[in-house]
Image: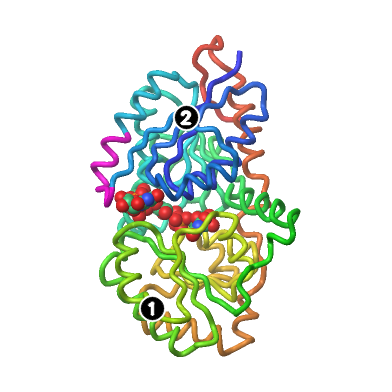
Amino acid sequence: MSKRILCIYGTRPEVIKMAPVVQALSRRPEFEVRTCDTGQHREMSGPVIEWFGLRTDHQLGLMTPSQGLSQFMAQALAKIDEVLAETAPDLLVCQGDTTTAAAAALAAFHRQIPVAHVEAGLRTGDRHAPWPEEINRRVIDLVADRYYAPTRSAADALLREGVPAASILITGNTAIDALLWTIKKLEANSPAFASGHDRPFVLITAHRRESFGAGMQSIADALVTLAGRFPDTDWIFPVHLNPNVHEVMHTRLGGLPNVKLLEPLDYPRFCQLLSRCTFVLTDSGGVQEEAPALGKPVLVLREVTERPEGVAGGTVKLVGCSAIRIVEEATRLLQDPAALKAMSVPGNFYGDGTAAEQIAADLAAVTSNGNGGKRFVVSPA
Ligand code: UD1
Ligand code: UDP
């Protein structure tokens, strides 16, 4: 009898990182896969769902403008609980550290449905950075039954918190599966893989809640200075739809000739630009994983990161939100070819593109010892 697995996503990065898992699980006859989209990112995740050809079985449509964390969490808990009641899954799979993922894990826990956590064990050790994600991750890892750690250091963090070693599998990050699959598909259609942007450019993204206000202003100040100092470089910035980002960036940077403020890009287009840029300025988690895989230096607009491997490998540098520091480090990369070259070394820190297959194979192994085929126990492999 097949096992029913419910995969939950809601934001753009969750869709990107969950898509390879849904695909890998769906290839196995022992699983009946259902998907649920909370709709946390109604606009931004739609094109990604389409790109990966995901079929969404349950669309909760929960996004509201400028949504509050508790308001969204409360709605997500209630609505996911309804989906759990209706579908009665044998297992729930959530990814990462968003409010969608934390609500899903809690809702499953309340119904005593086993939880598998993809991208388990990421920690900064600072519960306010990233906020609220650091606590979301810990909550999910308190209730999870099976832990898919992307790296050794993530697995070590889980072990330190008392998670049994037998419940953890180090797989790499499914972000790399999605990236390699996407690049391959784009390369197969090579004319479309042209950058479409002839001038040298720096790619920028920013959206962290703990940087709203002064931090975002400071990032904008740095970009004003850099754009003026380097008029032959374009500063391409697909702006997150969160009004706390969108309004600040459009007000401060709109009208600067070499700052290109764009709407959020389709994932394949973003991958194209990432593979062609000089370097990246970002506070994104996912981009910190993708850029090193493509040999692109990253200046991280945060004080701490839960992804230390890129920093240790020399491709990633933490610069925080101080305008002075951002300008200094970006200037170094643009003026000193040796500094740029030293950070432009491809690094396989976050996996080899087989994470989702490993997860599907592991779930097949640990769920095959079901309890009379009714409810199955996620036991150590
Ligand atoms: C959320 C996640 C964060 C993740 C980020 C990825 C939480 C608490 N935060 O960030 O972990 O890194 O997504 O991007 O789960 N909006 C739209 N359309 C969209 C998406 C957002 O209009 O498609 C606007 C809405 O006004 C929405 C606001 O952006 O209320 C914020 O969306 P939200 O999902 O809360 O994003 P973040 O917390 O910024
Ligand atoms: N991304 C995208 N379009 C954009 C910006 C980013 O498709 O305009 C992708 C990017 O390749 C990465 C993911 O979105 O896979 C990162 O999302 P985000 O930075 O919003 O969230 P985080 O990773 O910080 O949770």
> Where residue 60 sits in the image (x, y, percent)?
37, 33
Q: Residue at x 56, y 90 (%)?
A: 335
How many numbered marks does the figure carry? 2
Q: Is residue 224 magenta?
A: no
Q: Earlier in the sequence, mark 2 or mark 1?
A: 2
Element on which disc 2 rests: strand
Density class for disc 2 (Cα within 10 Å; few <14, some 14-19, many ≥20) is many
> Where residue 41 sits in the image (x, y, percent)?
40, 47
Element on which disc 1 rests: loop
| Residue 78 placement: quadrant | top left
Q: CA distance from mark 2 to mark 1?
A: 47 Å
Magenta span: 65-76
Does any portion of residue 134 appear in the rendered image?
no
Location of the C terminus by quadrant is top right
Q: Is residue 100 above or below residue 36?
A: below
Residue for badge 1: 255
Density class for disc 1 (Cα within 10 Å; few <14, some 14-19, many ≥20) is few
Q: Residue at x 35, y 33 (%)?
A: 106
Ligand 2 closer than 8 Å to the CB at disc 1? Answer: no
- At label 1, the amino acid type is Gly
> Where residue 194 sits in the image (x, y, percent)?
68, 66
Residue 47 or residue 24, whichever sits in front:
47
Residue for badge 2: 92
Does any portion of residue 260 appear in the rendered image?
yes
Residue 225 or residue 29, whichever sits in front:
225
Q: Residue at x 54, y 33 (%)?
A: 55
> Where residue 247 sits in the image (x, y, percent)?
30, 66
- At label 2, the amino acid type is Leu
Q: Is residue 90 above or below residue 328?
A: above
What secondary structure prevails in the magenta region?
Answer: helix
Residue 7 or residue 269, whichever sits in front:
269
